Amino acid sequence: MSINRVIVSGNLTRDSELRSTASGLPVLGFGVAVNDRRKNQQTGEWEDYPNFIDCTMFGARAESLSRFLGKGAKVAIEGKLRWSQWERDGQKRSKIEVIVDEIEFMSSRGDGSTGNYAAPANVSNAPDVDVSSSVYDEDIPF
Protein backbone atom coordinates (compact mmCIF):
# COMPACT_ATOMS: atom_id res chain seq x y z
CA MET A 1 0.00 0.00 0.00
CA SER A 2 1.19 3.52 -0.70
CA ILE A 3 -0.27 6.89 0.24
CA ASN A 4 0.32 10.04 -1.75
CA ARG A 5 -1.36 13.00 0.03
CA VAL A 6 0.03 16.41 0.86
CA ILE A 7 -1.35 19.48 2.62
CA VAL A 8 0.38 22.82 2.12
CA SER A 9 -0.45 26.27 3.46
CA GLY A 10 1.30 29.39 2.22
CA ASN A 11 1.18 32.42 -0.04
CA LEU A 12 0.91 32.45 -3.81
CA THR A 13 4.22 33.45 -5.40
CA ARG A 14 2.65 34.66 -8.65
CA ASP A 15 -0.71 35.15 -10.31
CA SER A 16 -2.24 31.91 -11.52
CA GLU A 17 -1.78 30.97 -15.18
CA LEU A 18 -4.69 29.36 -17.04
CA ARG A 19 -4.04 27.33 -20.18
CA SER A 20 -5.65 24.36 -21.92
CA THR A 21 -4.57 20.95 -23.12
CA ALA A 22 -4.90 20.05 -26.80
CA SER A 23 -8.26 18.45 -25.97
CA GLY A 24 -9.51 21.65 -24.30
CA LEU A 25 -9.14 20.62 -20.64
CA PRO A 26 -8.42 23.73 -18.50
CA VAL A 27 -5.11 23.59 -16.59
CA LEU A 28 -4.32 26.12 -13.87
CA GLY A 29 -0.77 26.59 -12.65
CA PHE A 30 0.40 28.57 -9.63
CA GLY A 31 3.16 28.57 -7.04
CA VAL A 32 2.98 28.52 -3.25
CA ALA A 33 5.73 29.67 -0.88
CA VAL A 34 5.97 27.78 2.41
CA ASN A 35 8.46 28.77 5.10
CA ASP A 36 10.63 26.26 6.91
CA ARG A 37 12.09 27.42 10.23
CA ARG A 38 15.70 26.46 11.03
CA LYS A 39 18.23 27.53 13.60
CA ASN A 40 21.24 29.34 12.15
CA GLN A 41 24.29 27.51 13.56
CA GLN A 42 26.49 30.63 13.37
CA THR A 43 24.14 33.13 15.03
CA GLY A 44 21.94 30.81 17.08
CA GLU A 45 18.86 32.66 15.77
CA TRP A 46 15.83 30.99 14.20
CA GLU A 47 15.38 31.92 10.52
CA ASP A 48 12.71 31.30 7.91
CA TYR A 49 13.77 29.56 4.71
CA PRO A 50 11.23 29.55 1.88
CA ASN A 51 10.24 26.50 -0.13
CA PHE A 52 8.65 27.20 -3.50
CA ILE A 53 6.08 24.63 -4.59
CA ASP A 54 4.55 24.38 -8.06
CA CYS A 55 0.84 23.50 -8.06
CA THR A 56 -1.47 22.38 -10.87
CA MET A 57 -5.26 22.10 -10.95
CA PHE A 58 -7.38 20.64 -13.75
CA GLY A 59 -10.96 20.99 -15.01
CA ALA A 60 -13.83 23.43 -14.76
CA ARG A 61 -12.98 24.42 -11.18
CA ALA A 62 -9.50 25.38 -12.30
CA GLU A 63 -10.98 27.66 -14.92
CA SER A 64 -13.40 29.32 -12.51
CA LEU A 65 -10.78 29.80 -9.78
CA SER A 66 -8.20 31.33 -12.10
CA ARG A 67 -9.54 34.87 -11.57
CA PHE A 68 -9.40 34.56 -7.77
CA LEU A 69 -5.84 33.29 -7.31
CA GLY A 70 -3.54 36.32 -7.29
CA LYS A 71 -0.01 36.83 -6.03
CA GLY A 72 0.16 37.14 -2.26
CA ALA A 73 -3.10 35.31 -1.51
CA LYS A 74 -2.84 32.92 1.45
CA VAL A 75 -4.21 29.47 0.63
CA ALA A 76 -4.28 25.94 1.98
CA ILE A 77 -4.20 23.17 -0.60
CA GLU A 78 -4.60 19.44 -0.46
CA GLY A 79 -3.56 17.11 -3.22
CA LYS A 80 -1.02 14.56 -4.35
CA LEU A 81 2.59 14.76 -5.47
CA ARG A 82 3.48 14.11 -9.10
CA TRP A 83 6.97 13.78 -10.52
CA SER A 84 7.59 14.91 -14.10
CA GLN A 85 10.63 14.49 -16.31
CA TRP A 86 11.44 16.10 -19.68
CA GLU A 87 14.38 17.09 -21.83
CA ARG A 88 15.29 20.66 -22.81
CA ASP A 89 18.33 21.64 -24.86
CA GLY A 90 19.73 18.13 -24.49
CA GLN A 91 19.54 18.16 -20.68
CA LYS A 92 17.18 16.05 -18.63
CA ARG A 93 15.06 18.02 -16.17
CA SER A 94 12.56 16.99 -13.53
CA LYS A 95 10.32 18.45 -10.87
CA ILE A 96 7.81 17.48 -8.22
CA GLU A 97 4.52 19.37 -8.14
CA VAL A 98 1.27 19.19 -6.22
CA ILE A 99 -1.82 18.16 -8.19
CA VAL A 100 -4.51 20.10 -6.31
CA ASP A 101 -7.71 18.34 -5.24
CA GLU A 102 -8.93 20.95 -2.75
CA ILE A 103 -8.12 24.59 -2.07
CA GLU A 104 -9.16 26.87 0.75
CA PHE A 105 -8.71 30.64 0.77
CA MET A 106 -7.07 31.66 4.05
CA SER A 107 -7.09 35.44 3.61
CA SER A 108 -9.94 37.85 3.12
CA ARG A 109 -10.34 40.45 0.43
CA GLY A 110 -9.22 43.41 2.53
CA ASP A 111 -6.14 41.96 4.22
CA GLY A 112 -3.60 43.82 2.10
CA SER A 113 -2.52 41.02 -0.23
CA THR A 114 -2.68 41.69 -3.94
CA GLY A 115 -5.03 38.89 -4.94
CA ASN A 116 -8.49 39.93 -6.13
CA TYR A 117 -10.48 37.08 -4.73
CA ALA A 118 -13.87 36.71 -3.15
CA ALA A 119 -14.40 33.03 -3.81
CA PRO A 120 -16.02 30.54 -1.46
CA ALA A 121 -13.88 29.50 1.49
CA ASN A 122 -13.50 25.86 0.50
CA VAL A 123 -13.50 24.50 -3.03
CA SER A 124 -13.01 20.83 -3.77
CA ASN A 125 -11.73 19.41 -7.02
CA ALA A 126 -12.25 15.83 -5.87
CA PRO A 127 -15.37 13.95 -6.98
CA ASP A 128 -18.13 13.41 -4.43
CA VAL A 129 -17.88 9.82 -3.20
CA ASP A 130 -20.39 8.13 -0.92
CA VAL A 131 -18.33 6.03 1.46
CA SER A 132 -20.36 3.96 3.89
CA SER A 133 -18.97 2.96 7.27
CA SER A 134 -18.93 -0.69 6.18
CA VAL A 135 -15.96 0.07 3.91
CA TYR A 136 -13.88 0.86 6.97
CA ASP A 137 -15.05 -2.17 8.94
CA GLU A 138 -13.51 -4.72 6.58
CA ASP A 139 -10.02 -6.13 7.14
CA ILE A 140 -8.77 -3.52 9.59
CA PRO A 141 -5.53 -4.97 11.04
CA PHE A 142 -5.84 -3.22 14.41
Image (spheres, rainbow, N blue to C red):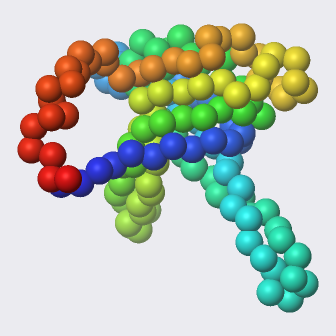
Depicted 34 relative to depicted 130: above or below: below
* Front-most of residues 99 and 90: 99
Q: Nearer the viewer, residue 21 or 132?
A: 132
Q: Please give the name of the residue rendered at 36% of the width and 54% of the height, measured from the top-left corner.
A: 83
- Relative horizontal placement of residue 75, taking residue 130 as reference (left or right): right
When asked about the image quadrant of residue 117, the answer is top right
Does 123 sit above or below residue 112? above
Residue that appears at 31% across and 18% down: 127
**Residue 15, horizontal then vertical, whole percent:** 69, 30
Residue pictured at 69% horizontal, 61% vertical: 36
In the image, farthest residue toward the left: 139
Residue 124 percent location from the top left of the image: 45, 20
Visible residue check, residue 71: no
Q: Residue at x 44, y 57 (%)?
A: 95
Count of labels in the image: 0
* Quadrant of res 116: top right
Residue 11 in the image: x percent, y percent? 71, 39
* Residue 16 appears anywhere in the view: yes
Task: State the quadrant of the N terminus.
Answer: bottom left
Say if 18 sits above or below 42 in the image.
above
- Name which quarter of the figure residue 93 lies in: bottom left
